Image (cartoon, rainbow, N blue to C red):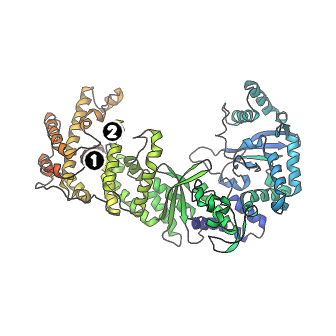
Amino acid sequence: MIYSFRMLGKSILQAEGYYDEPEEIGKRKIFLKHQSIPASEKKGKEEPEHAIALNFDTQKREFRFELDRQITPAYRDYFFAFKVGSSRDKKKFLSTNSVSVFYKKIFTESLEYINKKRKGKTKKCFTDISDIYDAFLTELQEIFYVKEEKNYVLNKELLRTDQKQVFDKLETEFPKAKAEELYDRLLNQKFFNRSSKDNQSFPQIALIKIDSRHILEYEDYKKSYINLVYYDLFERFFVENGKKDKICHICQSRAETIGEVPLPMKFYGATNELYFENLKKKNAYKSFSICRDCLAEVLTGMRHIENELRNYLLGISVYLIPSFEEAERQFERKYKRIFNLLKANKSYKEDIDEINNLVKKSEKKDFAFSLLFFDKQKNAFDILKLITNIEYKKLVEKLGYFDDFRKAYDLALLNQSFTLNDVRRDFFPSEKSHNAKDIRKLYRKDILNFLEAFLHGYSISYADMVGRFTDICNRRFHRDNGDVLAPFKAVLFFSILNNIKPLKGMAMTGGNAVTEVQNEDFQKFFETHEAIYKENYYRQGLFLLGTAINNIVAAQQKKASAKDGGGEGDEKKKGKRKKASSTFLKKLNYSGIPTRRVRNLLAEVKDYTEIYDEQIYNEPGIWGNIMDRLQGIENSGMKGEEVIFYILTGISYAGYLGMIHAKKEKGGK
């Protein structure tokens, strides 16, 4: 995986001209650009937000807050912004992600940092930071800040008149508030039309300007500032803790290597201290060492993935890591499309076509990637699952099955999706089945193990999947969140899994039948999903019993509708539509029905069909088919979860047929 980061970074730096740049300062700026805040565009119609600028006017000797340029990728070079480090780090970036560091810390801590580094073994590096840069920062601090106790804070008396008036009013209104809070309130009121001290929703970039110019617009200070940032984000790892004449574990060359591991995406997990020899971080190079050139490429690749190839998949944070054998150009669009492909809520076809068009333009006709699922809280980076070497062509083949069934069953006509997201909701905990606080801890490990098995074609346990489905179905039914088509789509998914690799434990013959099913739709369903139904007459019998139950439920709903005073429109208007739980469905045990109880259920269903005889259309020979196929089921060894599952598939498929018939009768309206 670390090699993939390196090759990705090399591709990016190569495209930027990094390796052809003759001047060291130019190379440093290119590298730093890709460590900077990416200024991502917001999706939708919403206008991109503007950065906040603290503008010091040295002529008028006043300062003001203002909105600067829009935060878009086009202005990434202009902003040259970097994230604030940990609370222990000195604040030194003049364009960053937190405006609050400008209220008091920025110049004081910048000067402290530079003065400290000008001593000892770091002294040589700081000859690249000119004394006139120090003098510049000192002058700004002396003009616009005032010393309070140990800190220099913005001198509120120099705030521009119109903003000073607002600040004074806020100071009167909130007499106990600190200056930082008052500045936050000022920004909220002035630029965001809200009365709040919250700064979490501020724009992702804030910068200092001097006489309306960014620090990089000053030729006298630009080089010093770039060198300062470069040292902090890169060079210090070699100067302060580097190891001479060691083997780089990536390129195998003998060179100066880092002594610690500064990678933002610690592939071993930040909480795993045992990774280091003798539990000491300074011995990390013995387990993993990396030279200067490789580190620049790895950091570039990692930051790009953090910024551009990060997403949520099945509700879990994930990085997509391209697999490159060598530097590659124009890779990004096809990899970003992979997220669309995996997250699709309807058809996969559009995204597959787009990626295929991109692949045709490249030399390689296939490509691979990895998915790194993680949990990141504060300074901890914990890996939940790494699924490696996912081949695009094989993924398309698997997802193509979904689209094939979607088309075969006209699901678009019902505005029904059938994707991996449906599988996730129907087989694993979600807000539809569980309390929100339970979801996170309940499903992540299981769903990721399942996803890996699906993507790589590992055998999946049939009993496990049936158990998961009936558990979710049971919970959703009792929360009135049931999905009538979920069991039908579960059968489609089992057929997909069986096409990829037969489900473990699903193949099973059972029962006998001397009668033929006359309903062509039912016959075709058994034939299409023959791995599930063809040689198992018990499953067929339970399915057919489910179709009879569906007829009873439809009759009960129709009777309830008439009793409540009208047709469908009237029911919606009055809000009196009967819930499914008030029909025969309530009699079913969704957690499982033992085979010994099937005979009793069969008799009860038969009784209900006689009660609703005039309202029910009985399929010719249906009861003979059912009785024939369920003979001896009590000795079949079927589990209760299987019994209810196949009954539900019959209910669901009969419901599907009713929906599709009604849609076609109404011309799709």
Q: Earlier in the sequence, mark 1 or mark 2?
A: 2
Q: Nearer the viewer, residue 184 or 469?
A: 469
Which residue is under mark 2?
477
Amino acid type for the residue under numbered disc 2? Phe
Tell me how far mark 1 sits from mark 2, CA to CA: 15 Å
Q: Nearer the viewer, residue 418 or 467?
A: 467
Q: Residue furthest front?
A: 278
Q: Compared with residue 392, is residue 519 higher up or lower down, i.e. above or below? A: above
Q: Nearer the viewer, residue 101 or 482?
A: 101
How far from the left and from the top, in percent, is residue 411?
34, 50
Mark 2 lies on a secondary structure that is helix
Mark 1 lies on a secondary structure that is helix
Residue sitting at x 45%, y 57% = 350
How far from the left and from the top, in percent, is residue 107?
81, 46
Q: Quadrant of the C terminus?
A: top left
Which residue is under mark 1?
641
Q: Compared with residue 40, is residue 584 higher up or lower down, i.e. above or below? A: above
Contact between labelled residues 2 and 1, with CB atoms less than 8 Å apart: no
Q: How many marks?
A: 2
Foreground mark, 1 or 2? Answer: 1
How far from the left and from the top, in percent, is residue 30?
71, 62
Residue sitting at x 35%, y 28% = 575
Q: Is residue 382 visible?
A: yes
Is residue 418 found left or right of 54 in the rendered image?
A: left
